[in-house]
Amino acid sequence: MAETRNMTYDSIMKELMEGKYRPIYYLMGDEPYYIDKISDYIAEHALQPEERDFNQTVLFGSDANASQIADAARRYPMMAERQVVIVKEAQNIKNTDALEKYAKQPLASTVLVICHKNGKIDGRKREYVKAIQQAGIIFESNKIKERELPAFIEGYLKRKGVGIDPKSTQLIADAIGSDLSRLTSELDKVLIALPENDRRITPQVVEDQIGVSKDFNGFELRDAIVNRNIFKANQIINYFDKNPKAGSIYSFLPLLFNYFQNLMLAYYCPQKQSQEAVAQWLDLRSPWAAKDYMTGMRNYTALKTMQIISKLREIDAKSKGLDNPNTPPGELMKELIFYILH
């Protein structure tokens, strides 16, 4: 039996695309995107279209109990190699005893897909976990980290045969965030709009298709602050103040906090004069990504960086109403940018 404990999304999908199906897939975690992608692929490819009417069953944990699910899984396929049973909202199943019993002796001709979103299998049920691992796969779908978004976007587009520059990648990541379902939906819309003879996403394409200004956005604000460009930073802040949908203090505060937090760490790098060493120290994807931190160490002292981090925390608290009875977000933005740049 192949090892199933550490299978990634890519390794599971590779196996499925090769036509290999396990008796049980327990898909769990806080990121629904990967759970949906795996279960949808099985639903669309494990059976021929004409086989699905009699051999594909979709149940919901809020409506069906464990005994009903186990009974469905024990049925034999009709005029097909296998049957598929997909259980959605499995987190709502109260008592899993019948499923635990089934997992110990699953039917080889059944592909049982259990979708447990926003949580995971009870770790105390060791026999259940062990039985599933012996028969099939337990996959935990974790939320993607903000710093991993650019790599996700680039990888998604590369598989579609589309290129993208770093600025456009960051614009999309900042504008949409880590909701992968929404992110891939927006990327798909952009792909449809690309001409056949130019399969590359540029800042202009992002502005036209997603509605993010290529000149006034969080990425450009961060760049202006890194380079201590006072005029440009104030231009962007004033634009945000007049166009709240384009950017707000709530969207760029995490971006700036992440930058200055990493800048503070860069000062502790034993070889902080080396761009390659700083990139490795900060666990960045490439030496090129450390360029902004090299610039930041020239423009901001370690002491000023510490003070900025403290100010970011103060403004964050005020933006949430703490010790701030009436200062509007626009004024807080201006106060923060003035403090950082002077």
Image (cartoon, rainbow, N blue to C red):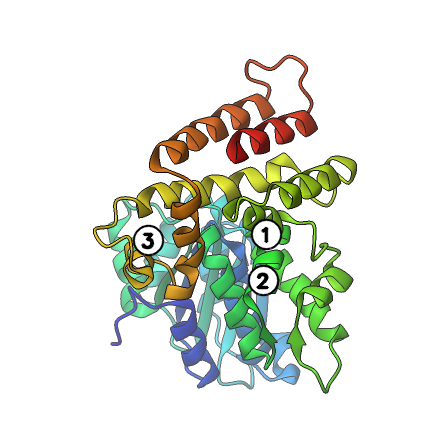
Evaluate if marks 3 and 2 touch, with contact meaning CB atoms under 8 Å apart: no
Residue contact between numbered discs 1 and 3, judged by CB atoms under 8 Å: no
Along the line of sight, the residue nearer the viewer: 147 or 166:
166
Q: Say which quarter of the image contains residue 315.
A: top right
Which corner quadrant holds the N terminus? bottom left
Answer above or below: position of 271 versus 267. Answer: below
Say what secondary structure mark 3 lies in.
Answer: loop
Q: Residues under labels 1 and 3: Cα distance?
A: 19 Å
Tell which circle, 3 or 2, labels the residue nearer the N-terminal end: 2
Seen at 48% across and 51% down, the residue is: 146
Q: Residues within 10 Å of mark 1 (few under 14, many from 20)?
A: many
What whole-number distance in Å separates the C-alpha atoms at marks 3 and 2? 20 Å
Q: Circle 2 is placed at which residue position?
A: 167
| Mark 1 in CB contact with mark 2 (< 8 angstroms) | yes
The residue at which mark 1 appears reads as 219
Q: Is residue 123 above or below residue 210?
A: above
Task: Report the residue at 30% width, 68% height from top.
Answer: 4
- In what element is the residue under mark 1? helix
The x, y position of residue 184, in whole percent, is 62, 64
Give the image location of residue 54, x and y in percent.
61, 76
Residue type, label 3: Leu
Q: Amino acid at mark 2?
A: Lys
Expressed as whole percent of the image width and height from the top left, the position of residue 123 reads 29, 46
Of pointers 1 and 3, the one earlier in the residue sequence: 1
| Pick the front one: 63 or 209 | 209
Asked if one can make out residue 70 in the rendered structure from this viewpoint, the answer is: yes
- 275 above or below 308? below
Tell me the residue that label 3 is attached to: 282
